Image (cartoon, helix red, strand yellow):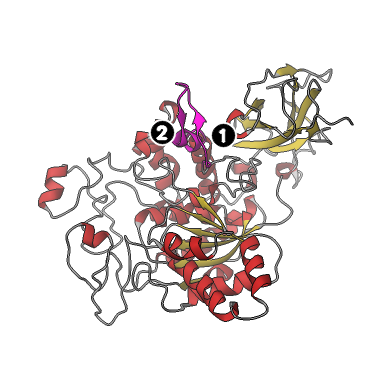
Amino acid sequence: MARDKKLRTVIMHDPELDDLNTMVRYLLYSNQFETEGLIYSSSRFHWKGDGKGTLFDGKSEHSDLGIGPISSWRWDEGSNFLEDAVGIYAKVYPNLMVHAEGYPHPDELLSRVCEGNVEFPGDISKESSGSDLIKNLILDDKPGVLYLLTGAGQSTIGRALLSIEEKYKNSSQWKNIYEKVSNKVIIQSFGDQDGIYASYIEPNWPNIEFREMATTIWGYMARKVVQPQDCHYLSAAWTKENISKIGPFGEFYMVWGDGKQMHKNDIADFFGFSRVTVEQLKKLGYVSWYGNVEEPGSWISEGDTSMYMNLLDNGLDAHIDASYGGWGGRNGKDIDSNNVASKDYASSRWFGAAQRDFAARIQWTVTPEYEDSNHHPVVELVGLEDTTVKPGQTITLKAIVKDPDGDHLIGHWRQYEETGTYPGKLELISVEEDTKMGIGCSYPFNVPAPGSSEVAKLMKNEIEVTSQFKVPTDAANGQTIHFILEATDNGYKPLTSYKRVVLTVSREKQ
């Protein structure tokens, strides 16, 4: 199921607890990416200052709170949570390599940590090591998209693009450089946290694709949008059992009431307190913008995790187009169980599967034997050689799902109505083959002799999941129909894999 080539990424964070938690999850999936940079970046919520005591009197979170000119905001000197995260990754790296291929060496990741434009929010007046890194990556000749992923502001990206513009705009190379940059870069960002996208990037580089990845389900307000069946994934009980009590990454991960604080005397970070009231927090000088205090040990936030979730190699192929949808949501609304169109539901619908996946991967970090952890089902599409279909045609969707651990599997096809351009709902008919490998059935195959060293890594169970449907006769030329195969094992911390099929209608004679 793995892609032929890893996606190239640059990760940008400011020093907030949700960025730290986002980084923990990212490193557990780092085998799926070519991580080109881990860059400290500023935002209106966090900026370092120039170290000279220069006072900043522009707009940022501090001015919203009525605080006058200051020299830095929520950024302690020596803040190094990216290096700390990679240091923990180094401790668990040997175990991670047992369970999946492709994890980058810790030294490689550490060498790619640098500081971007962090002095003041929205400042692109100076080059930085981070902006230079991005500039060089944009201009290199490696094929494929470069994903610039930021959970902070975009000043480091803006400075990189400005440096390219300053060097080439008045040269004969400008047209080719401009086209290269515009085609190569995709920015996936949790908002425009310093105004640089609106003030510089969009006006000057309008052909760079910008994907807004802000979601509620991955942030501080997740409890407002989580699906009823997924509420327990935010609870103290589930978080302790599956995340915070599991190895060094679990200890590093921040939860409600853990007594931790990213910055000394940070009046906006009160999450480390337990068993206090909002009124008590206010008396202590904290800005209790969250509104209440949650159970100690429960989920706080991974506010920026959605910036890379659609790049995961889970079979949803959500990186292809912002409208496709995946664990990070999409640029559209999905219809929830109450028949309400909701952008929140477009991301929250996947939350349970994503949390179980996270729990399985963090378990890998403390499990030195392959057979002692759960691993993802592997999905292979069978027989659908042409994805161009005609109105009235009967189409068979067939996939083989295999499990490396011998777990029982269930699977089903469904239409992802909201992402296709055909406006109707289609009837899918399940088909059981003569092999009796119908939906939900499993049987052992190719099982080596007991004691074989390869027993854990061979696919030991499989099912065939087959459905049919008829292409509607009213389907218009060029309309698309999306189908998702979802397959889940019943292992400890069940895991789900997917396969997306996109069919395009053609009314032309063939």
For label 1, the residue is 494
Q: Residues within 10 Å of mark 2 (few under 14, many from 20)?
A: many
Who is closer to the viewer here, 482 or 287? Answer: 482
The amino acid on which the numbered mark 2 sits, given as a three-letter code, is Val
Residue located at (71% from left, 35% from top): 501
Residue 426: which quarter of the image? top right
For label 2, the residue is 226
* Residue located farthest toward the right when viewing the structure as drawn: 510
Quadrant location of the N terminus in the rendered image: top right
From mark 2 to mark 1, how far is it between C-alphas?
A: 19 Å
> What is the magenta range?
329-350
Judge left or right: residue 336 versus residue 8.
left
Who is closer to the viewer here, 225 or 127? Answer: 127
* Residue located farthest toward the left when viewing the structure as drawn: 283
Lower position in the chain sequence, tag 2 or tag 1: 2
The amino acid on which the numbered mark 1 sits, given as a three-letter code, is Pro
- Residue 296 location in percent, x, y? 28, 42
User: Any magenta on residue 386?
Assistant: no
Q: Is residue 122 above or below residue 222?
A: below
Q: Secondary structure at mark 1?
A: loop
Q: Residues within 10 Å of mark 1 (few under 14, many from 20)?
A: some
- Residue 502 location in percent, x, y? 71, 36
Q: Is residue 415 above or below residue 19?
A: above
